[in-house]
Image: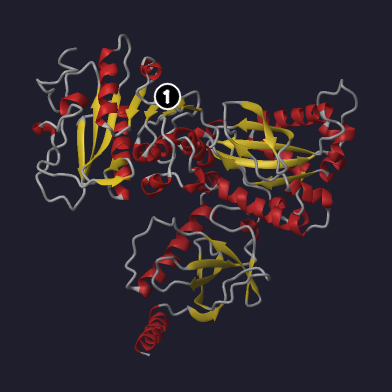
Amino acid sequence: MGRALQKQMSLYDIISGINDNFCNWRYTKGRRPSSANSRDKSMYDGWFTSFETKDNTNFQILIQVEDWDFVSLPNVYVKAPLPDYIQNLLPLAHFSIDKREYKGDWYYSVCYSLHDAYELKISDPLGVLGWVLDKTKIIIEALIKNKRHRSDEFLRELTPIWQSIASYHSSNLIKSNDAAVQSIHDLLLPVIYDLKQGWHLVPWIVKDGHIEANTLIIHIPSKQLAKIPSMPSVFIDVKSSKGIPLKYFLLWLKQWSHVAFRLIVSEIASNIERHRETTLYFPVCLVVDKQLLSLCIELENLKELVSGSASKHLKLANHSKLLSNSKVVFSSAVNLTPNFLFTRNLDNLEQPNLIGKNIALLGCGAIGGYLGLSLARLGAGASGGKLTLIDSDIFQEENIGRHALGKVYLHRMKASALKQEIAQQIPDLNIEVHNINACNRSILKNISNYDLIIDATAKIEASETINKFFFDSDGKTPPLIHSWIRGNGECVQALYNDKNTNYACRSCINKSGNSIREEYDALKGMTATRSFMACADFTPFAVSASMSAAALTIDMILDWLQGDVSPRYRTRYTEKWMGEKIESKDYAPSLECHICKIN
C-alpha cells in the first residue's frame, strides 16, 4: 500500500505543479496514439498544450509520459492538420510520415532529441517536461525557418525517412489482394556487400534462392548532388499505398542527379531487352554516402515501350500514361559493406581498420575464437584483404565452457568452425583456413605473405617455435603479436615483436621447460591450480579470461595500425589479484635469450 500511495501522491503533486507552472497545459490519460489495429492497451499520462512560432503559426502538442523514471523520454505528437506550407514539406526530418489517432484527432510523432544526447535531472519531472517542450519548439522553428538546416537534417535523416516510407508501402502490400503487387514485396530485402564508386550491377538473390535480376547500384556522394530536394507528398499519399507512379519518382530523382536518372532509364530498357519474357521487376539501390535507398521498379507495363533490339532507351515524354501505371516500391536494404560495418565504430575515433590487410591467426582456441570474431569486425578479410585461420585441433565438449563457439560446432575442426561462425555473423569476407598445426613449416615459411601475425596458441612450446621461425626468417618479416593467459586467469598478457627493434621477444620472457624469468614475471610466487582429465591436464580459468586476452590483443592491434605499439609487453590484471604487479612497458631483451640474442 505504501509504495502505491507514494506513487499516486507523487503524480498528484506533478499534476498540481504543472497546473501552477504551465497554465495552458491540460491533463489527459489514454493509450499511445496509434493506428486502429494497435494492441497496446496500456494507459499513459499526457498533456495537451500549444505554442506559436515566430511567424505566428500555432502548433497543438500532445506530450505523453510512458516512463516516469525518464529512462525513456516522453513522446511528443503534433496535431494534424499542419499548416499547408508545412504539410507540403512532408516527408520531413524528425516528423513521422504516418498520422496516428488519439481520442478522435490525428497526430504526427516528433523526434526532438537523440537517444543518448541528453543529461537531465530525472528527479525533477517538471523540469524534464519543460525541457521536452522547449526542445520541440527549437526543432520545429529551425525546420520551418531555415531552408539550409531543413536540407541538412533531411540528408542526415535520409535512411529513417526512406525506411518509414518503405514500411508504409510494405504494410499496404501485405493487405493488398493484388498478386502482382504482393510479389514485389517478395523482393524487398536486398543485401549489399560491395559499394564501388560510380555504378555497377550485382546479382540480387530473392527469397527462394534464385537470381531474379541484377541490382543497379548507383553511388551518389552528397557533395555531388545538385541540390537536396524534399520528397514530394505523393510518395506518402493514400493513392500511392501500392507504390509510387514511376513518372513521379523519375522526376524527383532527376532533381537529385541527372547521372542516376539516365542510368536507371537506360538500364530499365536494357533489362527488358535481355529478359523480355521473365523480368517483372527491376531492383535499384541508390547510395548517398553510406546511406542505402533501395527500391523496386515494376516493368510489366513498360515492356511495350521497348520494341526491338535497336531500342536503347525509353522515350519518356511520349509514354506518360504507361509510366504512371508502372509503380516504384521503396524497400529497406541491409548494408553489409566493409565501409559501413568496420568503420562505424572507428571513424570518429580517427582509428584505422584491417580492411585490405592480410592477417594470420595462429590458434583458434579459447583466445583465438574471440580474436577471430573481433578481427573480422575490424575488417580483416574485407576489400581485397585476407584473414587466415590456422589450427589443427577439434572442437570438443570440454571447450564449450570458455570458447566463442557453441555446441553446433562439436567435433568440427576449430579453424573451419570459426570461419563458418564468422561467415554467419559477417558474410562475404575472404577467410582462408588451414586445419594443420600452427607450427607446421609449410605455414611458418610463408610468414612474409602477411601484414601481421597473431599467435593465440597460448602454449609456450608453440610460441617459442613460432618465435624462432620469426627471427630466423629472411627478407620481409611482418610484426608478431603473442597473446596468452597467466595462472588461473589472474592476468592476461600480450607481447609485440618487431625484428627491426631491440626489445624483449617471447623467448626472453620464458623458455619452454623453464619458469618465466623473474624480471618479466607478472605473477611472482603464484602457482596455478591444475586439473586432470583422462590422459590430459589443463589449467582452468574464468570464462572472462579468454575474452580479456582477446580484448588486450585487439587494443594492441589498433595501436599497431596507428603506428605506435608502445608499451610492447602488456599485462592486464583482474581486480582479485592482490600480489605484486609488473608495469606494462617496453622491456629490454634478456641476456640469456637463446633466440633474439643469437640473431
The residue under label 1 is: 357
Query: Which secondary structure lies at badge 1?
Result: loop
Image quadrant containing the N terminus = bottom left
Position of residue 9 in the picture relative to residue 49 (left or right): left
Residue at point 24%, 17% (across, down) = 499
The residue nearer to you, when weighing 377 against 472, is 472
Q: Position of residue 188 (x, y in %)?
A: 69, 45
Q: Is residue 291 left or right of residue 250?
A: left
Q: Nearer the viewer, residue 61 or 462?
A: 462
Q: Quadrant of residue 216?
A: top right
Q: Residue furthest bottom?
A: 1
- Looking at the picture, tell me which residue is in the foreground, 395 or 404: 395
Amino acid at circle 1: Lys
Residue 150 visible to an observer of this rendering: yes
Q: Residues within 10 Å of mark 1 (few under 14, many from 20)?
A: some
The answer to whether residue 89 is visible is no
Q: Residue at x 78, y 51 (%)?
A: 182
